[in-house]
Each structure stands twice: as structure tokens, then as C-alpha cells.
Image (cartoon, rainbow, N blue to C red):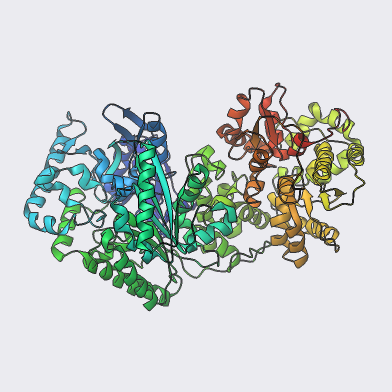
Amino acid sequence: MTTATRDLAGLMDRIAEIAPGLRVGTGPGATGPYAYDASNYRVLPRAVAFPRTADDVVAVLRACREAGVPVTARGGGTSMAGNAVGVGVVLDFSRYMNRLLDIDVEARTARVEAGAVLDVLRGATASHGLDFGPDPSSHSRCTLGGMIGNDACGNRSVRDGRTSGHVEALEIVTADGVRAVADRSGLRAAEPGDAEAVRRVARLESGLRRLVEENLALIRTELGRIPRQVSGYQLHHLLPENGFDVSRALVGTEGTCAVVTAATVRLVATAQASALLTLGYEDVVEAAEDVPEILRFSPSAVEGMDEAIVATMRARRGSDSVTGLPEGRAWLYVELEGDDQAAVNTRAAELLDVLKAQGRMTGGRVVESPAERRSLWRVREDGAGLAARLVDGGESWPGWEDAAVAPENLAAYLRDFRKLLASHGLTGVLYGHFGAGCVHVRIDFDLVTETGRAVMRRFLTEAAALVVEHGGTLSGEHGDGRARSELLQVMYSHRMIAAFAAFKKTFDPDGLLNPGVIVDPAPLDADLALRELPLVDTTFGFPHDEDGFTGAVRRCVGVGRCRSDSGGVMCPSYRATGEENDSTRGRARLLQEMVRGEAVQDGWRSTEVKDALDLCLSCKACSSDCPVGVDMATYKAEFLHQHYKGRLRPRSHYSLGWLPLTSAVAGYAARPVNLLLRGPVGRLLARLGGVTTRRRIPAFASRRALRRTLRAAKTRDRAKAVLFVDSFTRAFRPQVAGAASRVLADAGVPCTPQDGLCCGLTWVSTGQLNVARRIMARTVAALDNGDDRPIVVAEPSCAAALKRDVPELLGTEAARRVADRVHTFTGALTDLADQDWSPPPLPENVVLQTHCHEYATFKGRRPADLLRRLGVRGVDEAEGCCGLAGNFGFEAEHYATSMAVADLALKPRIDSLDGRTVVADGFSCATQIDHLAGDRNIRALHLAELLDPAPEQPGETS
């Protein structure tokens, strides 16, 4: 046992002694994902602790102080400056200390634990007409503790300012393990009956008062000069004229002075009326020139971005994912709010007229559509991720993403800043809070080579001098972290740097809280995550990533949208478990560690990586919803293929992975097979195959039934398309093939059925890629026969496999030609149907479960949009995965997670159907709905069955 291992074991024993129920993780599987946040840095911690109470935090701090081990507090881990990584013990507050403790509507305050996600707080206060003012773009996953650590702002900071302006009191644990309360009148012990704690807190407050008295003039002249001056410590809140507000002084200290466990925050009233204007410009400098004029109209938000972000969004999610923007190459969003909609509209019209007269805009409009407004804000909120991996494949990085100047100086600063970029041969993607003078920029630094890192260091040093020259600050909301702390000496005098050091030492004399940040900073180019990594031979081609698999897993930059706490499609396993390792980000970070080969040393054989990937449902939603396009389903398939190469696989890989073959055989004797599977033999076979016995095995359809239904649907019209009869439709619901054929013929797209082929999906999802390639090659050879007709696939998952997996796994021109022809059933009716086609009468309201693969792969061709266009007024879409996800929910060990995912969106809708029709094109989705329905007479219809002009009678396909 090494000394380091022995010391860690001793620390763990001491923590267990003080806090026996505290969960602590060690080893690469636990610590690997916490070596990163959303910054450029990688710092592997020794352990990760998951406190449930403030007493747990006390225990960790006391044990770490005894052992001399640093502590870093962490919320959502979305820091872009490296504030949330550390070498010692990381405290993850987001897992358990995430509760809303109290909402006082009358006083307009809320008390929350440090790990509470902002959107959870906002959701709870919305019904009272209240909100928490600061709203960073990461609002769906950032925590209040993280916002307090950075003094976060957000899109509406023009109106609401910084987090520090909304904090009433902080509940903290000091570096020596004492619980205290910091508020607007100073510090007090949390437990007044503890005489020792009272004494220590009094001594701490006395030291702070002495520090302020000794530096009054310095603090008054160097701090609080512009609204976004976040860099350094906010000592001006301790001035006598500011009431010695210790709570506000601790906001923005980035966990370097005390650990915040809970906070009492002030709430603001929700605006009753609003208007959103989008303004187009030739470039961002022109946009910045108009900001002072816009501010005269008291907007709640003035946000800017350049064309690179919009182009990337459209490329990743479809051309219709961004609408409502006028002509231009840069844009401002201007939001106006008030109590009366007519008055707000009048202000918006006046503002447009004034700006048109200024003559800088290329166009401007008021966005009326709520859907367009949501779409536009989504683009802005995903800016950091979208800018990280651009449409041309280029990568950009943070590091100087957070500088701010006074708004009236913004245009001049941006003009000089772009010259500085050009002088170093760098390019930046610009966006941010223009109304507050705060500009985010991601820059195409070369962080891999020593030469590139040297360029970055020179640039950052000169950029710091430039922003100071324009009266600005290094950080406007993200904090200094590891990225900018070294540069504070450019912004502040030596005396102020010494005052900062004295402030930290008063709180943390041993320097154990988040060392290397703000005081005694680590070099800004130390601990950079990127370096030259080995290229890896894989079966998938990863054509969109220059370095193949290595480049693919490097896509994750840590912005954490997969940890969204407010609904959505990505990431179902994280939403079900709340564990970082079950998020797309956590898995990507462990895969990065695997490629790096330091903490995770056994490569493809890694059990830590296998365990992290185990609960991935391969839903593919991350490939669409992740701003940088991480495709964890493909990474998992590749890993499973490599991990089990030459080894015995899990039983379910054989029983479920080979389902297309076994179901084809079962189709020749469907009735006796089904009878056998319903009894004890079926349960035995399920257990032997690693399949849960808590679900009914779907009944196989006979081959005769498929032939009969296709014969009945045959049309005399010349076929304009090919109807690909996939394995699931063929084996379990042949009536869908008949219905699809009739609907397409009715819509002017008569089809030729293509039976007997397979997309290879089940072999891909279980990582049996060699078999998948053989199956796919046979299918491509049959389809790429000189026929260029569209290929329509009724099963969305099979359509997605043909569209994406087949060309990426085979890498041939033939595979790409086939993929280009593939349409889902929805896509065929959207793109190929006669313009004057109308379906039979439809229900007014439906509950819809969209297959995740369809959502992710076929952008802009959503069943919900088609249903609304065809006249269905109410489409209640269960947003997110059904939980079954192909083989996943049938595997015995995954049943509980499968049902937990269903509980998120689908099950509540099935439990409150009220007679509404259920539509689910995916076989997995329909099977899960059948399972959730139990004994109730509920069956999900395929869209083709809903639209069928001449439905078959029951029994015709049995």
C-alpha cells in the first residue's frame, strides 16, 4: 500500500467515524467525472463526498483539516473558470442537499439548500407570482450554491443584477468546521449554546472588521466601480456605509473562504406583460453601438450573439430550429417588461422606430409567437455549448469568456478586442449580456501543444490589460477560478491583492478551501485537460470527429445540459437516478479518462466505464439535445463491442440482441410459441435469457398474417416509394405495415413492400458490431440496387438505424445513398404526400409518445407537428423517453430504472387519459404503454393505424 493510499484510507476512516452515514466515493469510477467542470481544466480529486446535512459538511471539513486535505464545494459543476475542481475532497451538494426549505410569500423570501437547482426554486415560486431574479443560461441545472459561489447574473441582469443583490443570509461552515450564519449585520454562530463556536465566530468577525478598517480608502477606490465587477473579493460590502454585510461579501468567493450549506434569498415579482424584439446587425460591434440607446427604454434583457451560434444550431437541429431572426450576421434580443401589455407594446414600437432612425440595424421585429420566443431563447441559452463545436467542425474554448465593461464602453472594447484576437491569429465566437457590458467569447485556442498554450497565455495577459484599459473587469459573472486568478494582479494594485489574501486567511488560515483560486493562484495554464491523446481503433467510423473516437468523447465540454432538472428528452437515466455518473456528461468524462489512460488504466476492459454506461438507455437524445452533439448511444455500442471482444457476454445480449433472427423463426409457429411463452416455460426462458419476468413477452405474429395484411393493402398504382418492413413490425404488429401501406397510397405515395431485411439495430445496441455490419451490408446491397425511390420505415428506431448507424458503421457510398433515401412514416407524410391529401376524421385530442430515436435523428419531422397540421387540436406529448428503450427495459437488472424513467412523463399521462387516444409509433413505446396500462383497455396506436382509411378488422392479423 502506497503512502497516498494509506493516507486516503485514514481520511476515509476518520470521516466514517465522525459521520457514519455519509456516502463517500473513491477510485476512478467515482472521482473521474468530478475531475472536470465546464472549464479547460482537469484536476482529479482524491474523493467525492455527498453530504445530506450541514453536520455531514462539518464532519468532512474537520476530518480534512486534521489531515491537511483541501476541500472543494461543488453544485451543478457548470463552472467555465475551473472553480469546481480540486485535488482533495469534492463536496457534491447537488445529489442530496437540494431541498427548498421554506418560501415566505409575504416577505418574498425563500430558504434553500446549496444544491437546489434554480429552476426548481423558480417552479415552486411561480404559482405565487414570484421569481428569483438572476437567471443564468444554465438555469435548468445550476444550483443556488454555485450561483452564490460565482455571484452569477444571467440574461435579465440589466433588471435584476447579480446574485449578491438577492441574498439575505448565508448558512455556512467555516474551514475549522464551525456552523455560522452570515447576514446583513455580520456573523453569528448557528448554535448559540455552543460557547466554543460563539467564540470562534466572534474572533472571525473581529478580524474582518479590523481588515476593513485598515483598508477603507483602498476598498472604496478599487471595488464596486461597474455593475459587473465580480473579479476578486467583494470587500466593499463590509464598508460601514454598506452595513458590514458579510453575506454579500461571501457571495462570489468561489468556495475559498467558507462552505455555503443553505441561503435565504429575496424574490421578485413576476412581470405581467412582456415583449421580445430581435434586432439584426452586420456585426457585434454595430450591435454594441446601439446598447446605450436601448438601455434608455429600461429593458429587462439585452442579449447579443453572432452568426456562428445560429448556424451551428440550424445545422444540428434543423433549419427551422431558429426562426424569428431578421437579416444579419449578429443579433440582439431585447426584452421589455411591465404591468400592462399595451404599454409594453407601445414601448417596443417606439424603440424599433428609434433604432431604425439610428441606421445601424439590418432589420428588427417584435416576436409575437410564444413558440418562436422559446426557440430564440433556447439558442441563446445553449450559446456556450453551440459555440464549443461549430458547424465547420472547429473547436473553441473558454478562458476569456467572461470579461465585462460599462455598457457605454462595450463597442470600443469589442473593436479593440477583435483586433487583439487577430493579432494572435485567433478567432472568437461572441455572445452574452450586452446590456450589462458582459461579453462571453469562446476562442479557438490550441490547448494541446506547448506552442498553442504559450499563445493562449500571451493573449490572456494582453486581454486582461485591454479590459482594464477600458475600465472593465476580468470576470463579469463566472468568477476568476483557475482561468483568471493569476491575472488579478493586472486588474488590482498590490495592496488590494494583499487585502484579498488577508480576507481569505481570516476565514481559512490553512488555505484548505478551494486552493489555487483567487488567492495564491495556480498558473492559468496548469492542469489543462487537453493534451495529445492516443487515437483509438474502432468499428464505428465517427466521421464527424477528426480524431475518431478520441475526438468524439472530447466533444463533452461540461456545460451539463444533460443534467437538466426541468424536463426534456435528455438524459433519462440521470433524471431517474440523479447521479452524475448516469448523466451524459459523467459518462463522457469517464470515457475521456479511459482514453487518457491515467486514472482509468485498463482501457476497453474498464469495469468503471462499463458500470457508468450500464444505465444508458441508448435513447440518442443527447446526440440532438446536447449542444455539442455527444452521441452516447454510439459510444456505448462501441464500448460494449470492444469490452466483450472475445469474451462471454451478458445473457440478454444473446436473447434480445438476436431477436430479429429468433422472432423470424418464431413467426413460422407463432401460436404454439406464444402459448408456450405465456406459462412457466416462458418465465424460465426469460430468466435464462436475462429478461425480466415482470413484463409480458409480446406475442409473435405469424408470417401468414404479414403476407395477408400486405396483400390486403396492395394497390394497383405505380409505386413511388419502398415500404421497409422492419423486424419489429414483421414480428409483432404486421397490421402496422398494412395500415402504413394504405395511408401512403391514400396520400399519393403508393409503396412496394420490402420484407426480409433488417437494419441491425438490436446488434448495435448490444455492441455486437461485427454481426451488425454483416446484417447491414446485406440490407444495403438489397436496397442500393439502382432504385432511388424514398424508403419509408414505419418503426422509428429502425429508420434511425438506417439513417445514421448504417452509414457510420459501414462507411460506404452505398450506405450513404441508402441513408439519404430513408424517411420515417411521419417524414413521408410531411415531405412526400399530395398537398391536397386529407386523412379520415381524427380525434380532437391525443396523448403522444414520440420515439427518442425519431426525435434525435429526424429533425423538423415530428409527429406532434404533423398531427396538429392534420387537425388534431390537443396533442399532449409525453416529452422524454418511455423507459423501455428497446432491450434496456426488458433486461432484468434494468426493470426498476425503466419504470422510474416512465414515471417522469409517460406514466402520469397514461394514468390520466380520460378517454383520449394514445399514439406511439415506436414498438418499444407501445409495449411500455401496454405494460403501464395493466388490465385497463388501453392500446397505443401507430400513427398509420390512426390515419388508416380502411382499417383491418380485429383478428385479421392474428
Q: Is residue 296 left or right of residue 898?
A: left
Foreground residue among 634 and 14: 634
Residue 93, image x, y percentages: 38, 41
From where the camera sits, is residue 280 visible?
A: yes
From where the camera sits, is residue 690 visible?
A: no
Query: Quadrant where the C terminus lies?
Result: top right
Foreground residue among 729 and 276: 276
Q: How many marks?
A: 0
Residue appearing at x 11%, y 58% in the figure: 218
495 vs 435: above or below: below
Q: Is residue 65 left or right of residue 564?
A: left
Q: Is residue 208 left or right of residue 116?
A: left
Residue 556, image x, y percentages: 50, 57
Residue appearing at x 32%, y 58% in the figure: 291
Foreground residue among 10 and 471: 471
Residue 868, image x, y percentages: 64, 38
